[in-house]
Image (cartoon, rainbow, N blue to C red):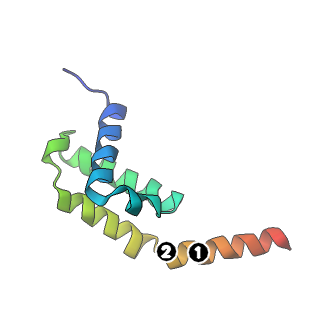
């Protein structure tokens, strides 16, 4: 059975939600979720499109890389506040 890339990507996102939990995903900003999704797509490509080959640790590492190093919450909050000040002025 051939599964298209979008279906595989959707299945991987569903797996990431189950590994990380819906509340964790729910508090991520939209840019963080986008970066996590892209990171998961790269991991999926490294594993030749086989979702079962991806470990929970890889998913957790991708999440931690995004929210602690690449785009931390403090940066997102500061950027959002600065953008709101610009719109108000």
Count neighbours of disc 1 (C-alpha within 10 A) and say few if under 14, some if 14 to 19, many if 20 or more. few
How many badges with numbers are in the image? Answer: 2
As helix, strand or loop, the secondary structure at mark 2 comes to: helix
Residue 2, x across and y down, in percent: 22, 22
The N terminus lies in which quarter of the figure? top left
Which residue is located at x 33 percent, y 32 percent? 7
The image quadrant of residue 56 is bottom left
Check disc 1 and report the residue beneath it.
Answer: 77
Check disc 2 and report the residue beneath it.
Answer: 73
- Vertical comparison of 41 with 76: above or below: above
Which residue is located at x 18 percent, y 62 percent? 57
Which residue is located at x 32 percent, y 58 percent? 21
Which residue is located at x 70 percent, y 76 percent? 82
Label 2 close to label 1 by CB (< 8 Å): yes
Residue 15 numbered mark, or none: none
- Vertical comparison of 89 with 32: above or below: below
- Vertical comparison of 69 with 56: above or below: below
Does 57 sit left or right of 41 as displayed?
A: left
The C terminus lies in which quarter of the figure? bottom right
Residue 55, x across and y down, in percent: 16, 55
């Amino acid at each position: 059975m051939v599964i298209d890339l979008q279906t595989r990507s959707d299945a991987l996102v569903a797996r990431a939600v189950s590994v990380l939990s819906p509340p964790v995903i729910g508090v991520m900003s939209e840019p963080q979720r986008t970066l996590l999704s892209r990171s998961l797509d790269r991991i999926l490509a490294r594993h030749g499109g086989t979702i079962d080959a991806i470990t929970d640790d890889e998913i957790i590492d991708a999440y931690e890389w995004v929210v602690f190093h690449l785009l931390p919450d403090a940066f997102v909050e500061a950027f959002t506040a600065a953008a709101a000040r610009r719109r108000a002025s």
